[in-house]
Image: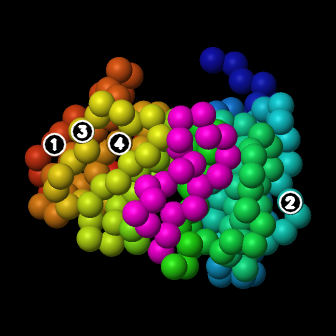
């Protein structure tokens, strides 16, 4: 099969960039990564793909983590504050985060007090965590909902998750894809919940350590 020299050069550029990156995230039609630098904890961001809303125009700063949504990306600065570019609303200015992750049109992060803070579009309550203010250790964002693990390992979800039973067992880790979530329980079994119209993830027995979206 014939491949143009320009396409081959582009593929080599992408492969080299990924090999030298410290963090990578793919949005709907764009990708961003943190390039390795002299700093062992971060580097500048490089993005490519469609640029309909400015999603491939990152700030010229050093970042430690990047996450991408539909037409936006957000990243943590070396001071643990968040900066976003593209189509995203209500980005916090001074809040400091341990980590962040993006859904379709929203994003959430865990603060240094182990609380969840969400921002972006709020069409189904996806940016409004439960009011009981649990302390969390890990979280994931779907299309229009979010779920998090409390410090005790139990799942709490908000947004478009009505009618879907949540797992009652303790989990070690969770991951989201569209409206479907899966996690690994304390025995290493995979437990899934949420909408399964498109996703084919099902409960699995076995010794697993983590799950991630494909």
Residue range corresponding to the magenta coloring: 114-133
Q: Work out whether mark 3 precedes mark 1 in sequence or the reverse, and give the earlier one.
A: 3
The disc at residue 204 is 1
**70 or 113, which lies in front?**
113
Counting from the top left corner in percent of width and height, residue 36 is at 70, 69
Label 2 vs label 3: CA separation? 41 Å
The magenta stretch spans residue 182: no
Q: Work out whether mark 4 precedes mark 3 in sequence or the reverse, and give the earlier one.
A: 3
Residue 124 can be seen in this image = yes
Instruction: Identify whether 23 is placed above or below 13.
Output: below
Label 4 crowd (10 A; few <14 / some 14-19 / many >=20): many
Q: Work out whether mark 4 precedes mark 1 in sequence or the reverse, and give the earlier one.
A: 4
Label 2 vs label 4: CA separation? 32 Å
Q: Which residue bears the numbered disc 4?
A: 181
**In the image, 16: left or right of 191?**
right
Q: Residue furthest front?
A: 131
Quadrant housing residue 8 = top right
Q: Residue furthest top?
A: 1
Q: Nearer the viewer, mark 4 or mark 1?
A: 4
Label 4 vs label 3: CA separation? 11 Å
Q: Which residue bears the numbered disc 2?
A: 59
Q: Nearer the viewer, mark 4 or mark 3?
A: 3
Label 4 vs label 1: CA separation? 13 Å
Counting from the top left corner in percent of width and height, residue 181 is at 35, 42
Counting from the top left corner in percent of width and height, residue 143 is at 52, 35
Q: Are marks 4 and 1 in contact (CB under 8 Å)?
A: no
Q: Nearer the viewer, mark 3 or mark 1?
A: 3
Q: Quadrant of the N terminus?
A: top right
Q: Nearer the viewer, mark 2 or mark 4?
A: 4
**109 or 1, which lies in front?**
109
């Amino acid at each position: 099969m014939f491949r143009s020299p320009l396409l081959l050069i582009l593929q080599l550029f992408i492969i080299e960039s990924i090999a030298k990156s410290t963090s990578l995230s793919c949005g709907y039609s764009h990708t961003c990564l943190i390039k390795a630098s002299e700093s062992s904890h971060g580097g500048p961001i490089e993005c490519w793909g469609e640029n309909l809303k400015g999603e491939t125009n990152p700030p010229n700063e050093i970042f430690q983590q990047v996450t991408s949504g539909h037409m936006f990306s957000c990243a943590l600065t070396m001071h643990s504050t968040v900066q976003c570019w593209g189509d995203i609303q209500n980005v916090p200015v001074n809040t400091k985060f341990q980590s962040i992750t993006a859904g379709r049109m929203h994003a959430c992060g865990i603060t240094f007090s182990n609380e969840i803070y969400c921002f972006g579009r709020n069409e189904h309550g996806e940016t409004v965590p439960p009011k009981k203010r649990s302390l969390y250790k890990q979280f994931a964002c779907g299309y229009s909902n979010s779920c998090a693990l409390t410090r005790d390992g139990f799942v709490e979800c908000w947004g478009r998750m009505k009618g879907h039973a949540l797992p009652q067992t303790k989990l070690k880790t969770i991951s989201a894809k569209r409206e479907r979530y899966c996690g690994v329980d304390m025995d290493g079994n995979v437990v899934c919940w949420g909408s399964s119209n498109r996703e084919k993830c099902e409960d699995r027995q076995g010794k697993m350590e983590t799950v991630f979206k494909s």
